[in-house]
């Protein structure tokens, strides 16, 4: 049956019967289409990842995996200088190649240090790009199955998603969001259990860009996942304290963390809301050579608009999280998608955090499916990177509206907190 709708009974209106027949026809014919889609996905991923294995990498090409690998090597050889490059960023308006996260983020890269020593840091970074790609699409697959989408439909969606600009940036610049999303997807398998906090804590340790997700179980009065998540995060970082020393810890806590939590990097690839409002309501886009102290945005109307928008987003998200008739997973993916709107620096690959929301919308047929496809199509549009916000403006408000309209009889995902079998009855909406 269509996810979120009961199968039309015999004698129902002709429109309902026609819709049911159409779904059945698509179900029968979806399998070969799905096979082709999975093949297209694999080939396209190979095309995206192959350039990483062609040395030497261009010095102008940004590769965060290379920064991580070099930082992991430095942490073992000269740990007292882990944040030296990050300290340089504190006085420069444009992005610097520096490790800027808590030391726990290095843990996945320690295993690549021997490869970096023998084959070069670029090779270790290339291997990481493959790992991150596998993690990213494994995460999206897990989430899609959680939202009861069939395998052929998932194949088509993922093949389509692989052509979007956030995916190009994620795989092309050696990011870690794939692993972060996989850990979150694993945690979402049962947000009622304390063990889900392990995935949340590890995700925050790898890249602490989405701490707001902990508010979802907290506000739903599920304290055990929150406590376990915080404990995992602290343990993952505490094990590095003897290595980097108290000076390294204090450098991060007192200088690096406060800076990156609020400073807006002067770079046109930074598509955070402050930069967007600077472009349209401020004095115009800032160049990389703009003064370090130049505020972003720099006009009163732009600042007011920025914080009004952020306040409205937070208020709507809070209402959805506190509305207990809305499934916790649906609230979770919506809150996850608020990260680009709240962060001071947002590179295009941050929009991969919006993809789970698109998958959830696609499962909320028929209206949600149309909106999801429209939002994903906008992620294909070339032009200024700020165009990605058009996709967010389609997906996030629509999801918020649909979630608020759901009730226990029509919700595509009848609250798992109260009706656990609802998400364990197998996929819907397509052939297996």
Image (cartoon, rainbow, N blue to C red):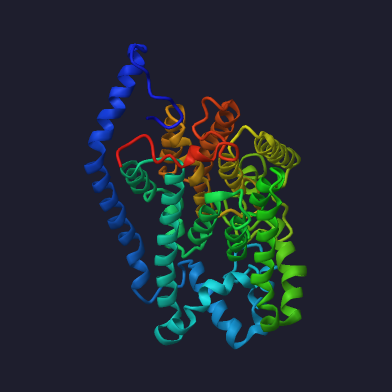
Front position in the image: 308 or 317: 317
Which residue is at a point 57% across and 77% down the rendered structure image? 71
> Image check: 3 left or right of 298?
left
Which residue is at a point 49% across and 81% down the rendered structure image? 113
Q: Position of residue 76 (x, y in %)?
A: 58, 85
Q: Where is residue 152 in the image (x, y as percent from the top left)?
A: 30, 43
Which quadrant of the rendered structure holds the N terminus? top left
Front position in the image: 215 or 167: 215
Q: Position of residue 54 (x, y in %)?
A: 33, 73
Is residue 284 something that shows in the picture? no
Which residue is at a point 49% across and 78% down the rendered structure image? 111
Is residue 184 something that shows in the picture? yes
88 vs 398: above or below: below
Which quadrant of the rendered structure holds the C terminus? top left
Q: Where is residue 146 in the image (x, y as percent from the top left)?
A: 46, 45
- So how many labels did they put on this image? 0
| Rendering quarter of residue 263 | bottom right
Front position in the image: 31 or 33: 31
56 vs 149: above or below: below
| Rendering quarter of residue 236 | bottom right
| Rendering quarter of residue 281 | top right
> Image check: 254 left or right of 145?
right
Which residue is at a point 28% across and 47% down the rendered structure image? 37
């Amino acid at each position: 049956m269509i996810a979120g709708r009961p199968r039309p009974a015999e004698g129902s209106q002709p429109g309902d019967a026609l819709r049911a027949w159409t779904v059945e026809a698509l179900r029968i014919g979806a399998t070969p289409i799905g096979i082709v889609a999975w093949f297209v996905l694999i080939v396209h991923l190979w095309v995206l990842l192959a350039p990483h294995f062609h040395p030497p990498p261009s010095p102008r090409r940004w590769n965060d995996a290379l920064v991580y690998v070099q930082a992991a090597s430095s942490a073992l050889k000269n740990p007292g200088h882990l944040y030296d490059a990050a300290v340089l960023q504190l006085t420069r308006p444009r992005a610097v190649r520096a490790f800027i996260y808590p030391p726990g983020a290095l843990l996945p890269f320690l295993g690549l240090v021997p490869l970096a020593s023998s084959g070069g840091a670029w090779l270790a970074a290339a291997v990481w790009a493959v790992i991150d790609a596998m993690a990213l699409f494994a995460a999206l697959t897990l989430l899609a199955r959680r939202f009861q989408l069939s395998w052929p439909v998932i194949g088509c969606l993922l093949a389509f998603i692989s052509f979007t600009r956030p995916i190009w940036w994620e795989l092309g610049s050696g990011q870690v969001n794939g692993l972060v999303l996989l850990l979150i997807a694993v945690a979402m398998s049962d947000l009622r259990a304390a063990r889900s906090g392990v995935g949340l804590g590890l995700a925050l340790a790898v890249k602490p860009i989405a701490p707001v997700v902990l508010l979802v179980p907290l506000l739903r009065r599920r304290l055990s996942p929150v406590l376990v998540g915080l404990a995992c995060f602290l343990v993952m970082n505490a094990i590095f304290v003897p290595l980097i020393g108290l000076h390294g810890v204090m450098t991060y806590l007192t200088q690096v963390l406060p800076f990156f939590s609020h400073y807006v990097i002067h770079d046109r690839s930074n598509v955070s809301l402050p930069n967007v409002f600077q472009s349209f309501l401020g004095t115009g886009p800032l160049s990389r050579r703009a003064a370090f102290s130049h505020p972003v945005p720099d006009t009163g109307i732009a600042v007011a608009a920025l914080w009004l928008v952020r306040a409205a987003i937070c208020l709507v998200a809070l209402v959805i999280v506190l509305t207990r008739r809305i499934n916790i997973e649906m609230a979770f993916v919506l809150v996850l998608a608020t990260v680009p709107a709240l962060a001071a620096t947002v590179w295009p690959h941050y929009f991969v955090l919006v993809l789970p929301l698109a998958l959830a919308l696609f499962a909320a047929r028929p209206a949600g499916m149309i909106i999801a496809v429209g939002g994903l199509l906008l992620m294909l549009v070339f032009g200024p990177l700020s165009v990605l916000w058009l996709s967010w403006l389609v997906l996030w408000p629509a999801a918020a509206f649909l979630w608020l309209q759901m009730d226990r009889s029509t919700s595509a995902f009848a609250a798992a907190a109260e009706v656990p079998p609802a998400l364990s009855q197998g996929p819907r909406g397509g052939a297996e």
